[in-house]
Amino acid sequence: MSSPAPVRCAIYTRKSTEEGLDQGFNTLDAQHEACAAYIASQKHEGWRLVKDRFDDGGFSGGNTDRPALQRLLAEVDAGRIGMIVVYKIDRLTRSLADFARLVERLEAKGCSFVSVTQAFNTSTSMGRLTLNVLLSFAQFEREVAGERIRDKIAASKRRGLWMGGTLPLGYDRHPDAREQVLVVNPLEAEQVQRLFNLYEETGCLTALTDQAKALGMCTKARRNRMDEEVGQRPFGRGQLYYLLTNPVYIGRVRHRGMDHPDRHPPIIGAKQWQRVQERAGRMRGQETAEGSASSPLIGKLTDEAGDRLTPTQTTKGSRRYRYYVSNRLISGPPDPTAWRLPAATLETGIATGIRAHFARLLHEHRLLAEPDLLRHGSAEEQLTAKIFDASGKSEAEARLLGLIEEGRVATDRLTLHLSSGAVAALCGLEPHDLCPDALSLTLAVSLCRRGVGAKVVIGEFARQPDPKLAGALIRAHRWLGALRQGADLGRLAHDSGISAGCLRGHLQLAFLAPEIQSAILDGTQPEHLTLHSLTRPEMPPEWDQQYRRTGISPA
């Protein structure tokens, strides 16, 4: 009689809290011992226990983000585990959705699992039904327990008790752990008061952020769950907005959109608090209304790091400038990899690219999944009426940008995915009628950093002279002509409102090779050529070296 094929068995144990894990024999050991005994009883079936232990202490079963479980699944994926043994099925997961994904993953690798205290066979329909019923009750138990905890927290906050969480700047926990109330930290309270005063003086979050950084103000120092020191970083704009609108500073606590009186002393007076809220509310309302109305790409674009591009705006005099900014620039310190892109240029370039994309599809008869001349002609008429022949440019742009579902911006390309429902509705079709190629496009993009911002060139549609660089070249020739006629350089600089050194640097533009100057005036120069790079002392006077340095070929 042949011996059965060996089955490599792994034991998985879990406990939701860390309580009692420091004991010599804890609940994880008890689970492991019971599972090991069960594996030993199946020795005649070829079961063999692997040496590695997979224990998760202090991790909830509500998700699969657990280190030992992830190690175990990696072993399964590598084909080194054929059976997972658990004390109870809820040790593996309490989520029915997670369980379904785990079963699919295990079956793909030929791995099974067994519960020591709950006998069932997942190879039969009745066994799978039993398992699903057990998991449904486990998930129900977890959700009910969560509701009880949330209700207790809500009731405690209504009574003015501090229920834990991240401590706000200006407060510490009470020395007596039984007292669920915050106490004022005098040094931090002074900083909070100063931030409120500065905001009343400036009325601008950006200016407040800059002033706080210049004064060395930082976020609250604290220790995380891993007992690591965190915090003590310069404030971001979003952090300051949250601080200024946090009712904890007037002795109240917020829970689920409602403010309740708390037992801790306030730091900010009621009148000052009201003034700050009115100003912050006006700014927030303006930004929300204007942002949603004038930022059609909001929530649709990400950068190469996967960070959302958020619409922002600034004003200079009576003019308003809009940008799409990597979110980490708003909520964190400066980041050279993040983007600050001019909104109007980006929106126009993308809209033009989408229009050209549809023009190619219609010309090549690639709009429909199954070519149908009659329906294709109708779709073409719809597109022409609503996109190409739109009466207003802004209306046409809005229609085109509204088709975007998501997009990713990189330094050399912009990848867009269009909504099948929106495109189909625009063409008078059903989503399944569309060819998959119609819903994706990639636009050639050149993003050139200009200080804190960037210049955007999308395909062939945005090639135009850089006004700043072209204007500087024209002024350089005008200054050179004046100097040749005997003008004084110092007087010329004074009349132009710049320093003599700056004027000397800009004069170099007039001595650039003819092809380089022509490229600047035509807007065809390489994107790395900026006013700053062309006026640096390192720019050689010899034309052949200038050609090599700029990448522009002589005629």
Image (cartoon, grey):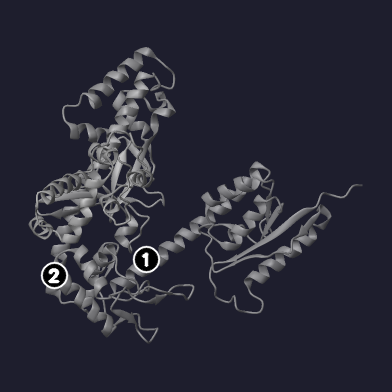
**Sequence-first tag of 1 and 2:** 1
Query: Toward which corner of the image does residue 440 lie, by quadrant?
Result: top left
Tell me the kind of residue under disc 1. Asp
Residue 59 in percent (x, y) is at: 54, 65
Furthest residue toward right: 1
Q: Residue at x 44, y 73 (%)?
A: 224
Left or right, 430 with respect to 519, comes to right
Of residues 347 and 542, the one nearer the viewer is 542
Q: Nearer the viewer, mark 1 or mark 2?
A: 2
Q: Residue at x 20, y 77 (%)?
A: 193
The image quadrant where one finds the C terminus is top left
Badge 2 marks a residue whose secondary structure is helix
Seen in the picture, residue 219 relative to 509 is either above or below; the reply is below
Q: Residue at x 42, y 16 (%)?
A: 371
- Determine whether label 1 and label 2 are within 8 Å by CB: no
Question: Which label belongs to residue 151?
Answer: 1
Which class describes the residues within 10 Å of circle 1: few (<14), some (14-19), or many (20+)? few
